[in-house]
Image (spheres, grey):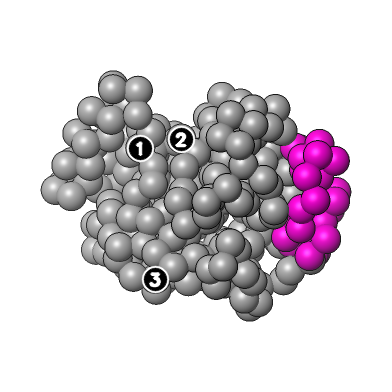
Amino acid sequence: MKISFIPAFKDNYIWLLTQGKRAFVVDPGDAAPVIARLHADDLTLEGILITHHHADHQGGVGELAARWQVEVYAPGSESIAGCTRPLSGGEQIDVLGQPVEVMAVPGHTLGHLAYVAPGALFCGDTLFGAGCGRLFEGTPAQMSASLDRFAALPDDTRVYCAHEYTEMNLRFALAVEPQNAALLARVERVAALRAAGLPSVPSTLGDERATNPFLRTSAPAVIEAGLQQGAASRDKTDVFAAIRAWRNSF
Ligand SMILES: [Zn+2]
């Protein structure tokens, strides 16, 4: 299975999964760039994976389903027009002959799902390069537990998130952990990629575990930063809540 991206809106990535001429897309918020790419590469769309209900993730489903006969996998508890396969997490689905695990990761939205293919995590707006999604619907405890589920995946898992937010997130991560050497190295790496007009994603879970403050709420420096921001205790949920609130006003 090959994975590439289709840029959409200002900073969204629609992930394109292909096997020969068969294709799936993840979170097609806009149909037009997907249709253009499928035609250009002479691909047949067989399925759509939706992580959550926000319009920039599902807005293109209707137009794509009108052109191709597709299965639409999506959170059953959220309002997703055109959903044919409602999911709640814990299922295993077949994507272009590959087994893909469906993971419930509430926090950004309550029904948010992630899709875990061999070596690849499609995490929507839950985990970003060096950051995590806003808590629009869930609690800090839910989001922290969802991120812990990602953190249990192997280091070399590639992280296919839905937005190019990494540079902005790295500026915040540096404020949390100014002495983190892996973080300083990543800042250089990402700056070079972006200056060359290249995406900063996918990253790997190893990168995220070493540099993403929201996956590092047990690290002493992140705990100290959380306490300075008013965390109620050193407990990882309290530290997560304080760091997330700081990020909102950063
Ligand atoms: Zn969203």
Q: Earlier in the sequence, mark 1 or mark 2?
A: 2
* Residue 120 to residue 182: above or below: below
Element type at mark 3: loop
The label on residue 164 is: 2
Q: Residue at x 38, y 33 (%)?
A: 199
- Residue 176 within the segment the image draws in magenta: no
Q: Is residue 135 visible?
A: no
Mark 3 is on which residue type?
Answer: Leu
- For disc 1, the marked residue is 200
Q: Quick check: marks 1 and 2 in contact, CB under 8 Å?
A: yes
Element type at mark 1: loop
For this view, does 218 lie left or right of residue 120? left
Residue 27 position within the rendered picture, expressed as x and y whole percent measured from the top left: 64, 46
Residue 45 position within the rendered picture, expressed as x and y whole percent measured from the top left: 68, 47
Q: Quick check: marks 3 and 1 in contact, CB under 8 Å?
A: no
- For disc 3, the marked residue is 153
* Residue 130 to residue 39: above or below: below
Q: Residue at x 45, y 51 (%)?
A: 2
The residues tagged by marks 3 and 2 sit, at their Cα atoms, a distance apart of 22 Å
Mark 1 is on which residue type?
Answer: Ser
* Residue 241 to residue 42: above or below: below
Q: Is residue 45 visible?
A: yes
The residues tagged by marks 1 and 2 sit, at their Cα atoms, a distance apart of 7 Å
